[in-house]
Each structure stands twice: as C-alpha cells, then as structure tokens.
Amino acid sequence: MSETISRRRVLALLGLTTLSLTVPTVLTVSDAEAQQPAPPAGTPPAGAPTGTERRQERRIRRTERRQERRLRRTERRQARREGRRERRDVRREGRTERREERRENR
C-alpha cells in the first residue's frame, strides 16, 4: 500500500477539489436584479450631433467664412479702384489746367 503519488496526480486532485468548491457557489441563483449596461465612454448623450452632422456643420461654417472673405476682398478692391480713379481724375484735371495756363502764357 505504499503507493507513491506523482506530481501529476496531486495537481489533478488539487484542481478537482477547487473545482468542486467553486462550482456550487457559481451555480447558486441570486435574487439581485441585472444592472443596465453603461454606455461606452465615447458615445455622446442623446441629442448630440453625430460625426456626419458635425462634419457638415464645419463645412457650412467654412464656406460661410470663405464667402465673407471673398466679399471683403471684393469691397477692398472696389475701394482701391475708386481711389485710383479719383486720384487719376485729379491728376488729369491738374494737367489740363497747367496746359491751359501754358497756352495762355504763350
């Protein structure tokens, strides 16, 4: 009866005993109600815009800013043109007056 027990058999017995102790506790029925799963951390609250909506809003804002820049640019150009035209007219008037004075002095 002096049977030697191998390591393999000892580990198998140890595994079976722990299994027999844990299975009854796992299989017992609990009276607790199930919890509602929490939403993932990255999801926005209800009513928040989706990624596509945010992208469209960015595009709309971008096009509005471009339009505003273009309008300001054209207004500046128009103001420059008007200023040039006025200065040119003043120079022309001055030239014609000087020419007339020269002709009179002759």
Image (tube, rainbow, N blue to C red):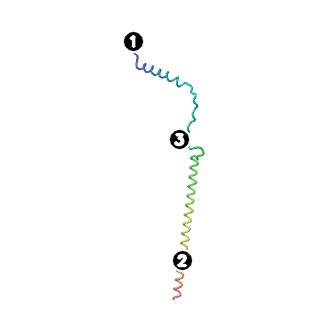
Label 3 residue SS: loop
Which residue is tagged 2? 90
Please name the amino acid that badge 3 sits on.
Ala
Label 1 residue SS: loop
The residue depicted at 56 percent of the width and 65 percent of the height is: 75
Marks 1 and 3 sit apart, C-alpha to C-alpha, by 62 Å
Please tell me the numbered disc located at residue 83.
none
Kindly give the residue lying farthest to the top in the view shown.
1
Crowd around label 1: few <14 · some 14–19 · many ≥20 (10 Å):
few
Please name the amino acid that badge 1 sits on.
Ser
**Do callouts 3 and 2 mark residues in contact (Cβ within 8 Å)?**
no
Label 2 residue SS: helix
Which badge, 1 or 3, is on the more N-terminal residue? 1
Which badge, 3 or 2, is on the more N-terminal residue? 3
Please tell me the numbered disc located at residue 41.
3
The residue depicted at 40 percent of the width and 13 percent of the height is: 3
Marks 3 and 2 sit apart, C-alpha to C-alpha, by 70 Å
Up the image or down, 70 lies above or below 23; here it is: below
Q: Which quadrant of the figure contains the N terminus? A: top left
Task: Tally the numbered discs.
Answer: 3
Please tell me the numbered disc located at residue 2.
1
Residue 95 position, x and y percent, is 52, 80
Marks 1 and 2 sit apart, C-alpha to C-alpha, by 128 Å
